Image (cartoon, grey):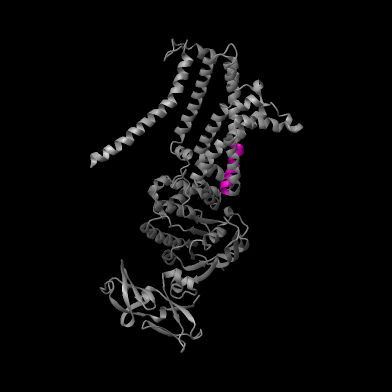
Amino acid sequence: MWQVEIESVTRQFGATLALDGVSLGIAEGEMVALLGPSGCGKTTLLRCVAGLSRPDDGTIRFGGRDVTDLPARQRDVGMVFQSYALFPNLTAAGNVAFPLEARGWPSEKVAPRVKELMALVGLEREASRFPHELSGGQQQRVALARALAPRPSILLLDEPLSALDALTRTDLRDQIRQIQLALGTTALYVTHDQGEALAVADRIGVMEAGRVVELGPPAEIYRSPRSRFGAAFLGARNALSLTIGSDGWVRCGGAFALPMRDGRPGSPIVATFPPESVVFDSEGLPGRIRLVSFRGALTRFRVATDHGEIDADLLSTAAPALQRDEAVGLRVQAEMIRFYAAD
Amino acid sequence: MRRRHAESLAGPAALRASAVALIALLTVAPILATVLYSLATVWRHRPLPDGYTLRWWWATLSDPDFLAAAGRSLLLTVATVLLINILVLPPLYWSHVRNPRIRPLLQLAALIPFVLPGIVMAAAINRFVGLWPLTATLQATPLLLLLSSIAVSFSAYLWAVDSAMRSAKIATLCEAATTMGAGPVYILRRVVVPNIKHGIAIGSLLAFASVIGELALPRIITGSAFETIPLWQLREMRGTDADPNAVAVSSLLLLILLFAIAVFVIRRGRAGVPSIIFGVEKS
């Protein structure tokens, strides 16, 4: 049984259909990330789960109990907001104590619980500071502690790292995941950052125009995205427009040649593959290097070919010392290629 | 290079200093003149009075008519501010948290006192309540004056509190508190009021200042039946026994009162006041 069950949820704002019959289940202790561009409906869905927005249609269940019409304050959720939403008039400890006091916890239980949570997020020494005296990362850790304080049945995170710098974002992302795993909390995590979603989630739901178009474990949907949108959104994949040959094969110079079981000969098709599936091979598709971009562990080569530009990511330690305008040959690992019908 | 930079700054610095001095002069000169006038025995065609006395202060502070007018003014003003808080704060809170669509209506209503002169509003209110027998009983009553004062002065309160709510991002804070299991009254008490209290204080001060100095409303609605300080001042300035020195004293007393309240409000919320007055939102 799902801990959170979202069934055919629809939400409309005027003429805009924000959620179009979304269905999704989250198992106990699982973290599902909703990934998608701005306006795809992911935050609306999160707000519906939190009880801050009411679906026009559909059902939301927590542990089998219908909570669709239950007010937000009775839903037993913990929520982390993009803008932290810490109460400026309360200290960090006061913020963490707030949900406990609001739920009527006895004061002798509040203090040790606050101490425990402040230790969990590594902010024991900042307990008496006010939000404006904390850094962005510290504020978001207080917000996380506050959301977890009453041991909610579901933790909701609305783009929790968007307002932070890159280094803090990575640290906090890992910390959120560690805490979620340690506590076994069921969580729904909304983000527009694919790297973040891939790193924290047990499963990822890719959303487009109010619908979940892709749902599965990160590695699975990264390697085998079902939709072209999912493929484009998940990993900055290369996308080449090709044609099915008269023999039923799709060929891309010397880069790859694969048979197509479905699809008529002569019809257009789009082949996508991630940059790390491209290797240099003098026998492969000829091209000329347009850009060499060092990215730490990886080096990206952008190569212009007769079929369009192709990005290749190679381990920096193993990357050849190639320069701009040098001629190269490319080959793509066939098992990483996915085909989609052309528009 | 550095000298040239310093020279380039010297011009604007001198200009700034001159502007500040001019503003200070324009602000201080009338107050200084009123102080001198309230202490003058006789002030003829000279820069300073002929002599000084505390007679006018003593006479004004022991005048039963003035004391009664001051009591009425304070009663009217305090009641107005209290009722504005009770009547305006809840719908404004609602407009931020639940129904943003009513906010433009509130803001539109708050623009009316800026557009219509007080005397026009007073006359309109008087005529309006006279249209029906039931409301006609309100005519010339302190209650109608109180209601009119609320209508005229709530706008200053609304702008200040609205700005404070925006600055504190009240809507998000309330949503956060709701997900934590807090009820509306608990949220109002623990989240909303503590985070906009400076806005409430500034708004109340502005409403207080506009009501206590209001002349047109009490003059047209109640007349001498409910004499406030501005009406008393008007009476003191008229007739053969006009006493402008007493008017100067009463004006200074009002100024001292407002100044004391303003200092109290600003000292209590030093950090919050600029953002509320200038509508600056926290980043």
Give the main secondary structure of the magenta stretch: helix
Q: Is residue B188 visible?
A: yes
Q: Quadrant of residue B91?
A: top right
Q: Is residue A172 left or right of residue A295?
A: right
Q: Is residue A16 left or right of residue B52?
A: right
Q: Position of residue A234 (x, y in %)?
A: 44, 69
Q: Is residue B154 visible?
A: no
Residue drawn at x 55%, y 42% as measured from the top left: B189
Number of numbered labels in the structure image: 0
Residue drawn at x 63%, y 58% as measured from the top left: A69
Q: Quadrant of residue A67?
A: bottom right
Work out whether A167 lies above or below A308. Answer: above
Work out whether B228 lies above or below B82. Answer: above
Q: Is residue B90 magenta?
A: yes
State the residue in front, A248 or A97: A248
Residue drawn at x 60%, y 40% as measured from the top left: B109
State the residue in front, B182 or A336: A336
State the residue in front, B45 or A313: B45
Q: Is residue B70 magenta?
A: no
User: Which span of residues is magenta-colored?
Assistant: B85-97
Q: Position of residue B50 (x, y in %)?
A: 43, 10
The single residue placed furthest to the bottom in the displayed view is: A247
State the residue in front, A97 or A89: A89
Q: Position of residue A276 (x, y in %)?
A: 36, 74
Q: Position of residue B175 (x, y in %)?
A: 54, 51
Q: Is residue A305 left or right of residue A9?
A: left
Quadrant where the N terminus of chain A is found in the figure: bottom right
